[in-house]
Image (cartoon, rainbow, N blue to C red):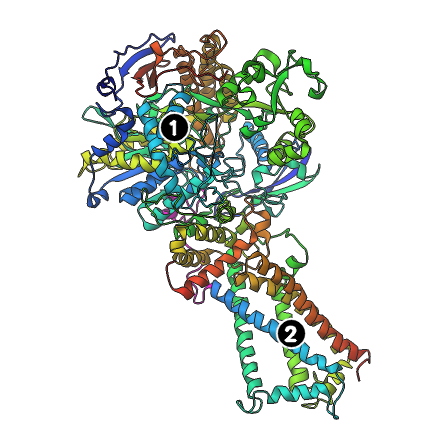
């Protein structure tokens, strides 16, 4: 007999083993999937809003204040007087922080499970194409985006040296942006990061629609289109800004 | 046609496997992959050597017994085609073909290219049925099902249970298999009655062995029964629905 | 009803003399139908008078079910639902794989909802008449009467039957029947019935009522002497993963192991379908009825090469637009498109002007086979005839033909490498269904007490020729609505009896016998060694020629001699590589071929013995003036049930006389 240490009970019933690959996990995969879908869509909404807000870079100054700086001030003061100054902003920041932690936990937990389920023989010879590539690289694009977010926060939110430009000043949003994008390497980092964002977002929206059970022909078609349109708009918007600064079109 | 075959040999579940190279000089374009293996095995048997073990049965694409990975792709290069219907005209003369078992940690190898897909049956045993005893059914004509729903249900019921979806999935997920059953039964007049209970039990069991769905779409591309890719989304949706409703139906 | 029907005063039966050396007449078998009841009411009368087992006592009984197809799977599920302890065995990896899954067309049911004037009577009549009066009428009434519940149940447990736009079930007409009573799910009705049944079985497995043993192949049946009667006490299986033999015992054994068409080597059956369970039962003393009754499907893909693994069925619907012909000249190897009209023989249209290309299966198969045997076959091996769409394409256009048959034409092109739009298709009759099988009484119990047989491995319903779409029905009726009544009726007599112990001398003796058989096969060391397929292929050729679509005395005699020689050769030279105590597919196959050789011999003996033509059993020496099958109801209106004789090459023919109440004997006519 070629079985070593056989699970005799299973073998008698014609199977190799009765042992499942994993015991019941604390958070089921379907819950993790839902969390990732919801938090992911939240981030999608966030980046759309973020980009739309930043487009004020191109609006003319009114009454001496830059439009973008005014927008920055609005973000701090919004919700007042219901919330204290910067209250609403901090609530949003807290929500985003929790969401990103949950999203990252979900990603790593699910990846570990799928690695165990797949086993040692990886799948080769995939179909290929943009969707397939985006799917395959989700973890990589996700990690790159995480690093980019940290970089971006240090650069334009916290103003930590040496990442932020030397003359960083809190509240001077437009000036800070122009200062940071006047450095070519930083501009390139932002442009590359946006390409990663496109890949992550296009697959993420498609996947979230699927996980949320959107299977009706019309809604599904709508989401398949949105999965390209939203990332494209966000990324083009976000790439145009640093490039136009770097090329000296905005000053 | 001339072909070089690299065929998987593995003595048992815990032994290491390896590829064995075989030259075939007289293959015919109309041969299926399985007939090619038959042909190779015939030579081994006539020489008194042990042939390659592989599973197959109906050879008409309906039983779901056969399951080989051909050049890294479950069942072979043809879309939505079982191994028994994959014919050699899809390959070129002189090509090398790599034949190995379905790959998934949930499918332990029994011998050579035969794997144990019991984990799929186990998912079914948890709820892939309608709880109705023989003889107790009401008149089928009084339970109306509209034409379209019936056909849509059949699209999902058509799953042949070969398990290629799992082997095709880089995550080792069985969402197409499980989702197909959830959709099929949730559309049937009496299957609806335990829709929530079924989703809870099947999906919880599913997660013990299989990975999650990343929507690679590979499963629907290889599925010999052509189960639509939307079936995968039934898994999370139906499970969440059951959790939020907290009821059996 | 008349008095004669009630009294059933039948003429005294006497065994006709056999022309086969070694055949002796045995007993007259008792069908165990109720007496004094018209045939149409027998089943309900029987059920009313059966014994019952109370729910609390059911767990005390253990039933072993072999197979997981439509008949065995449903019997196991239904018995599990009732509360019996059930063990179910399959050589597959999963219960869903059984070959019922491959049936395409549909399932008959005389629900008679439409106003096309269908009824249980008409269904019974079509079944009996279709079977050429070599089946039990009472069985056929049960088939028709229970058919209603089959559809309801299958629908309830998940089979998505085709629906009309109004939401009710759709039907189609099928196989030369004048009413529309065939329910279907596209071209995969068998799959949906099989999977629904499997799901019911899964449910019982999940609930712990049924224990499934996959990858367990039956080797033998444990039969012991119980007060002078043979009684089944269990089975011996071989674990296909480890090669280990094990005895399982129970209070009753059910075989639902399918048909034996693979004896022909080339058939439409799955590669693993086999006759071993049936032959082991036969060797243990269960009578084997009418093994020569085999249905050939007229529109199979011909065998083109020696590597081809099986024949594939092309839907009969092709005959709606395709015209079947062969050249008039022997050995005409010209390109068919260059053969002029006057040199073509549209033989079906010529011989059967009323039905033409749409005559029933057996008639079409026979006519095609006669052309081929007369040397008029076409193709590289001269083993097929043309099915030509030329005229249909001219009349309807290529698009219309593509719309109707594109999937079939594509399948043909992939398998044969020719386009049916350009050159005529080639088709040949191929073995498809076996009507013969283990003889069972009205309760579906074989001649061994406690051994039941259901589905294609038993002989019931189909007589000498099966009606289209009746096979799924018969398997479902057996498993869902017959055995769950008759098995408890049998078990009730054995309440509080212990089952045979697994280590009892009887069980161990059978285990040893199985081991011996395997050792014998593994131990053959001949001078001219070959694998099992070498012998199987030859057996198939012998049978297609000698005991195929049409039979004659000389060929049958020759076939018997050849098979005996082949069997000698097999047991002297067959070589099985590998080990017995490991997964060994060649050993599995070798054991099956050993059984096929015995079965092939018995089929030829039965075919030679039955000195008449009936249904699919077409004897060239029993023809009417215009060349049609001629039944001999005077002498042969009975079913032959075979038992091995005391010596080699000896056989005992038992007989169950057949009587017909409401469907008088008449001759089929499709002219």
**Which quarter shows the N terminus of chain C?**
top left
Q: Which of C142 and C567 is in front in this view?
A: C142
Q: Magenta stretch: residue B188 in it?
A: no
With B222 as the anchor, is C95 left or right in this view?
A: left
Query: Is residue A11 in the magenta section?
Result: yes
- The image position of residue C533, as x and y in percent, is 51, 26
Instruction: Name the element at disc 2.
Output: helix
Q: Can residue C312 be seen in this view?
A: no
Residue A19 figure quarter:
bottom left
Circle 1 — which element?
Answer: helix
Q: Do labels 1 and 2 share a chain?
A: no
Which residue: 67% across, 66% down? A229
Residue lying farthest to the right in this orientation: A248
Residue A36 vs A218, above or below: the answer is below
Task: Classify residue A167 by image quadrant.
Answer: bottom right
In the image, residue B247 lies at what x, y percent? 37, 62
Q: Mark 2 points at which residue?
A: A48
| Chain letter behind tag 1 | C
Q: Is residue C322 left or right of residue C45?
A: right
Q: How far apart are marks 1 and 2 (CA)?
A: 68 Å
Q: Position of residue A46 (x, y in %)?
A: 61, 75
Q: Which mark is residue A123?
A: none
Q: In the rendered image of this protein, does residue B137 appear above or below residue A123?
A: above
Q: Position of residue C242 (x, y in %)?
A: 41, 40
Front residue of this view, candidates C304 and C364: C364
Q: Mark 1 points at which residue?
A: C123
- Asked if the residue at tag 2 contacts the one at tag 1, i.e. Cβ–Cβ closer than 8 Å, the answer is no
Residue C443 placement: quadrant: top left
Q: Which of marks 1 and 2 is in front?
A: 1
Residue at 53%, 29% (x, y): give it.
B48
Find the magenta span and give its range.
Answer: A1-29
Tell me what residue is drawn at x 75 percent, y 77 percent.
A242
């Amino acid at each position: 007999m070629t079985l070593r240490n056989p699970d005799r009970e299973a073998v008698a019933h014609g199977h190799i083993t009765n042992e499942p690959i994993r015991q019941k996990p604390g958070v089921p995969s379907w819950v993790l999937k839902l969390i990732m879908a919801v938090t992911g869509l939240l981030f999608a909404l966030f980046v759309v809003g973020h980009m739309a807000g930043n487009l004020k870079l191109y609006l003319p100054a009114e009454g001496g204040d830059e439009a973008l700086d005014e927008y920055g001030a609005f973000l701090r003061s919004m919700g007042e007087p219901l919330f204290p100054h910067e209250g609403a902003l901090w609530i949003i920041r807290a929500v985003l922080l929790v969401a990103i932690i949950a999203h990252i936990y979900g990603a790593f937990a699910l990846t570990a499970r799928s690695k165990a389920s797949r086993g040692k023989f990886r799948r080769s010879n995939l179909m290929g194409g943009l969707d397939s590539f985006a799917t395959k690289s989700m973890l990589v694009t996700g990690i790159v985006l995480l690093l980019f977010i940290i970089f971006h926060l240090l650069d334009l939110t916290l103003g930590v040296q040496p990442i932020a430009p030397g003359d960083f000043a809190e509240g001077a949003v437009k000036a800070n942006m122009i200062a940071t994008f006047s450095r070519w390497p930083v501009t390139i980092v932002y442009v590359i990061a946006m390409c990663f964002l496109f890949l992550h977002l296009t697959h993420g929206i498609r996947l979230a629609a699927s996980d949320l059970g959107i299977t009706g022909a019309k809604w599904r078609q709508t989401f398949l289109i949105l999965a390209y349109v939203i990332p494209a708009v966000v990324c083009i918007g976000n790439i145009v800004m640093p490039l136009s600064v770097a090329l000296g079109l905005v000053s | 046609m001339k072909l070089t075959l690299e065929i998987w040999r593995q003595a048992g579940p815990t032994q290491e496997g390896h590829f064995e190279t075989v030259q075939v000089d007289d293959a015919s374009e109309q041969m299926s992959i399985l007939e090619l293996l038959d042909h190779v095995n015939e030579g081994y048997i006539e020489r008194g050597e042990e042939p390659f073990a592989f599973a197959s049965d109906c050879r008409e694409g309906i039983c779901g017994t056969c399951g080989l990975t051909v050049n890294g792709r479950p069942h072979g290069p043809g879309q939505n085609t079982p191994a028994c219907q994959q014919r050699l005209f899809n390959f070129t003369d002189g090509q090398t073909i790599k034949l190995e078992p379905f790959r998934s940690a949930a499918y332990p190898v029994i011998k050579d290219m035969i794997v144990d897909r019991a984990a799929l049956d186990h998912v079914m045993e948890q709820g892939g049925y309608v709880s109705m005893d023989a003889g107790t059914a009401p008149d089928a004509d009084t339970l109306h099902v509209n034409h379209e729903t019936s056909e849509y249900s059949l699209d999902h019921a058509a799953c042949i249970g070969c398990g290629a979806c799992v082997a095709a999935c880089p995550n080792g997920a069985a969402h197409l298999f499980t989702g197909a059953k959830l959709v099929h039964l949730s559309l049937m007049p009496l299957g609806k009655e335990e829709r929530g209970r079924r989703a809870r039990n099947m999906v919880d069991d599913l997660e013990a062995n299989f990975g999650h769905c990343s929507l690679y779409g590979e499963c629907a591309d290889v599925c010999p029964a052509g189960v639509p890719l939307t079936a995968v989304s039934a898994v999370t949706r139906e499970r969440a629905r059951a959790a939020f409703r907290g009821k059996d139906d | 009803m008349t008095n004669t029907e009630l009294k059933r005063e039948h003429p005294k039966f006497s065994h006709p003399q056999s022309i086969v050396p070694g055949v002796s007449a045995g007993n007259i078998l008792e069908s165990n139908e109720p007496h004094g009841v018209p045939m149409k009411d027998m089943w309900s009368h029987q059920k009313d008078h059966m014994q019952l087992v109370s729910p609390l006592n059911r767990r005390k009984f253990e039933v072993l079910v072999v197979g997981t197809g439509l008949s065995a799977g449903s019997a196991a599920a239904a018995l599990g639902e009732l509360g019996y302890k059930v063990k179910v065995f399959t050589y597959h990896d999963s219960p869903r794989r059984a070959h019922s899954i491959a049936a395409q067309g549909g399932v008959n049911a005389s629900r008679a909802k439409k106003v096309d004037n269908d009824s249980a009577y008409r269904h019974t009549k079509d079944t009996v008449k279709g079977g050429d009066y070599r089946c039990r009428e009472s069985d056929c009434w049960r088939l028709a009467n229970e058919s209603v519940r089959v559809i309801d149940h299958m629908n309830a447990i998940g089979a998505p039957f085709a629906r009309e736009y109004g939401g009710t079930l759709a039907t189609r007409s099928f196989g030369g029947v004048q009413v529309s009573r065939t329910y279907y799910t596209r071209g995969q009705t068998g799959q949906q019935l099989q999977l629904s049944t499997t799901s019911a079985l899964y449910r019982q497995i999940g609930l712990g009522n049924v224990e499934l043993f996959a990858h367990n192949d039956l080797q033998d049946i444990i039969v012991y002497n119980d007060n002078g009667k043979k009684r089944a006490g269990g089975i011996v299986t071989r674990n296909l993963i480890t090669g280990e033999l094990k005895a399982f015992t129970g209070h009753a054994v059910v075989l639902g192991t399918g048909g034996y068409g693979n004896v022909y080597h080339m058939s439409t059956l799955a590669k693993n379908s086999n006759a071993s369970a049936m032959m082991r039962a036969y060797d243990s003393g269960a009578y084997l009825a009418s093994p020569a009754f085999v249905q050939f499907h007229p529109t199979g893909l011909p065998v083109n090469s020696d590597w081809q693994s099986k024949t594939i069925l092309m839907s009969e619907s092709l005959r709606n637009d395709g015209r079947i012909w062969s050249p008039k000249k022997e050995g005409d190897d010209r390109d068919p498109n260059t053969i002029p009209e006057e040199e073509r023989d549209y033989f079906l249209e010529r011989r059967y002007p009323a039905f033409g290309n749409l005559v029933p299966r057996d008639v079409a198969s026979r006519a095609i086979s006669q052309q081929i045997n007369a040397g008029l076959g076409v193709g590289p091996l001269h083993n097929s005839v043309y099915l030509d769409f030329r005229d249909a394409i001219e009349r309807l256009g290529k698009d219309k033909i593509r719309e109707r048959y594109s999937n079939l034409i594509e399948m043909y092109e992939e398998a044969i490498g020719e386009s049916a739009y350009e050159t005529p298709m080639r088709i040949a009759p191929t073995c498809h269904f076996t009507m013969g099988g283990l003889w069972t009484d009205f309760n579906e119990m074989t001649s061994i007490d406690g051994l039941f047989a259901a589905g294609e491995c038993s002989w019931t319903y189909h007589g000498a020729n099966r009606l289209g779409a009746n096979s799924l029905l018969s398997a479902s009726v057996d498993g869902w609505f017959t055995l769950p009544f008759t098995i408890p009726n049998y078990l009730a007599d054995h309440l509080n009896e212990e089952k045979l112990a697994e280590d009892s001398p009887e069980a161990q003796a059978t285990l040893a016998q199985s081991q011996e058989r395997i050792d014998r096969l593994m131990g053959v060391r001949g001078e001219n060694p070959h694998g099992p397929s070498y012998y199987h292929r030859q057996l198939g050729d012998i049978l297609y020629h000698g005991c195929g679509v049409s039979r004659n005395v000389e060929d049958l005699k020759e076939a018997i001699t050849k098979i005996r020689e082949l069997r000698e050769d097999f047991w002297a030279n067959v070589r099985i590589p590998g080990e017995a105590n490991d997964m060994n597919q060649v050993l599995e196959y070798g054991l099956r071929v050993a059984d096929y050789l015995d079965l092939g011999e018995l089929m030829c003996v039965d075919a030679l013995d039955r000195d008449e033509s009936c249904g699919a059993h077409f004897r060239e020496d029993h023809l009417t003036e215009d060349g049609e099958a001629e039944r001999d109801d005077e002498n042969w209106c009975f079913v032959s049930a075979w038992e091995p004789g005391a010596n080699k090459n000896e056989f005992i023919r038992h007989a169950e006389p057949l009587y017909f109440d409401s469907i008088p004997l008449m001759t089929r006519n499709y002219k």
